[in-house]
Amino acid sequence: MYVMKPLTTTDTRAVDGLIDSRMEFQIAHGHRSGREGNGLRDVVTGAGPDDGRKAVGMWEDENLLAAFVLQRAAPQHGWTIEEREQPTLLVSHAHSLPRQSLLGRLAALWLSDYAARQQQQPLVRCMVREQALAWRLKRTCGWRHVREIRDGLGALHLLQRFPERSQRLEVVVSSDGMHEVGPDGEPWRLSDSPATVHSPLALPRHAESHTMSYRMRVTDEHAGPES
């Protein structure tokens, strides 16, 4: 069973465990590991700025499997003026347990479905540093690679997903308490009103064994969801 719900200070220990598991995996495989988890931890504990960012976790029973930060804000660096004017749901500071490729796919499907239920139906966008991660998000998680840019730290990959209802998602993922704050402090929550339903997105075949109702490496501050 997978449940998406907001993370609060009471989840700090679970978030720390998730970050530590990811860091240990990176070190064991010769990857750089530093302070990548600080951004996620700051949002969960409230140590970061009050800029509307909200942390969301994917749970299975009492186990935190993945987490990321959502924010309704205009994307900046690398996006065109027209793109910045479009309603956008930014995803950042994503972490997941190692060797859990299914989680990235389910998270991507949930993000598009969640965006489609909002009144403005924002585009879902993220930015990642690693080319290999950008490739996985595109090939296995259904993200669209918009463009690659460069800044003082190197390459930066811009990706996005369209808001898209996925009726089959309710079989495997539910949401609990997903009440957020949108632009200008407006209520931002799941909408029960009809939304445009696109062609259902295919779920991984081995994920369909879970039944659930619809209640619904991260590198730096630009990092997006990882598979």
Image: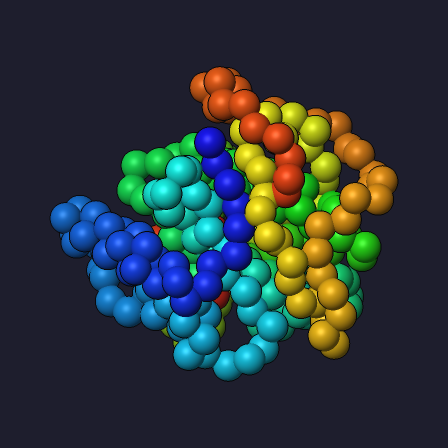
Percent position of residue 124, x then y = 64, 53
On screen, residue 178 above or below 181? above
| Residue pictured at 14% horizontal, 48% vertical | 28
| Residue pictured at 67% horizontal, 47% vertical | 114
On screen, residue 188 above or below 201? below
Give the colour scheme shown: rainbow
- Residue 67 in sight from this viewpoint: yes
Percent position of residue 167, x then y = 70, 29
| Residue pictured at 67% horizontal, 67% vertical | 181
- Of 7 and 51, nearer the camera is 7
Q: Is residue 121 left or right of residue 45?
A: right
- Of 72 and 223, nearer the camera is 72
Q: Is residue 126 left or right of residue 206?
A: right
Dividing the picture into quadrants, the one containing residue 42 is bottom left
| Residue pictured at 76% horizontal, 62% vertical | 86
Percent position of residue 21, x then y = 24, 50
Percent position of residue 9, x then y = 41, 67
**How many numbered markers are drawn?**
0
On screen, residue 87 above or below 141? below
- Of 104 and 139, nearer the camera is 104
Question: Which quadrant does the C terminus fall into?
Answer: top left
- Of 145 and 114, nearer the camera is 114
- Residue 147 in sight from this viewpoint: no
